[in-house]
Amino acid sequence: MNLSIEGVLRTLSVNLNKLIPLLVLVATALFLFGVVRYIAAAGDEEKTKEARRLIIYGIIGLATIIAVWGLVAIVIDFIFGTKTIPNIPGGDVVNPI
């Protein structure tokens, strides 16, 4: 087990890159569940409000996940000067040409 700062950051990065796609999946499922409930509400005002709330929570969740992922990539690039293009979580780092 590597207890250096680089080793800890690498381990944290690997684990977060596995967690982010799962969080995106959950937020997308919440959004789609809200859409299905909205369609199934058939004009019932209370059910429509609940479905709209689920849709909004799903959109906010997706926006938050993507914003935090991008912000972390920018901060890491600023601190460590890696000059890499951030990749989609779960993929490999893309180096600029």
Image (tube, rainbow, N blue to C red):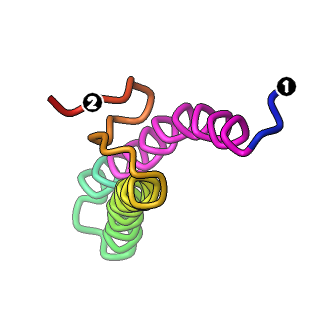
Residue topped by disc 2: 95
Rendered-image quadrant of the C terminus: top left
Q: Nearer the viewer, residue 16 or 85?
A: 85
Badge 1 local density, few (<14 within 10 Å), some, or many (20+)?
A: few
Residue at the (80%, 29%) spot, across then down: 2
From the top left corner, tell me how far across and down residue 39 is, in percent: 24, 52
Label 1 amino acid?
Met
Magenta region includes residue 50: no
Residue 85, by quadrant, is: top left
Seen from the viewer's position, the closer of residues 82 and 73 is 82
Q: Which segment is the magenta one?
A: 5-33
Residue 59 in sight here: yes
* Residue 54 seen from this side: no
Residue at figure coordinates x 65%, y 43% from the top left: 9
**Residue 69 at x, y percent in the picture:** 41, 53
Q: Position of residue 57 (x, y in %)?
A: 41, 65
Where is residue 55, by image quadrant?
bottom left
Q: Amino acid at mark 2?
A: Asn
Q: Is residue 43 above or below residue 24?
A: below
Which residue reaches farthest left?
Answer: 97
Q: Nearer the viewer, residue 46 or 81?
A: 81
Q: Nearer the viewer, residue 96 or 69?
A: 96
Q: Is residue 26 above or below residue 96?
A: below
Q: Is residue 78 left or right of residue 26?
A: left
| Quadrant position of the N terminus in the picture | top right
Q: Are marks 1 and 2 in contact (CB under 8 Å)?
A: no
Q: Which residue is mark 1?
A: 1
Q: Earlier in the sequence, mark 1 or mark 2?
A: 1
Q: Classify 10 Å Cα crowding around label 2: few (below 14), some (14-19), many (20 and above).
A: few
Q: Say which mark, if any, is on residue 25.
A: none
Indicate whether 5 appears above or below 34. above
| Dominant secondary-structure state across the stretch colored magenta | helix
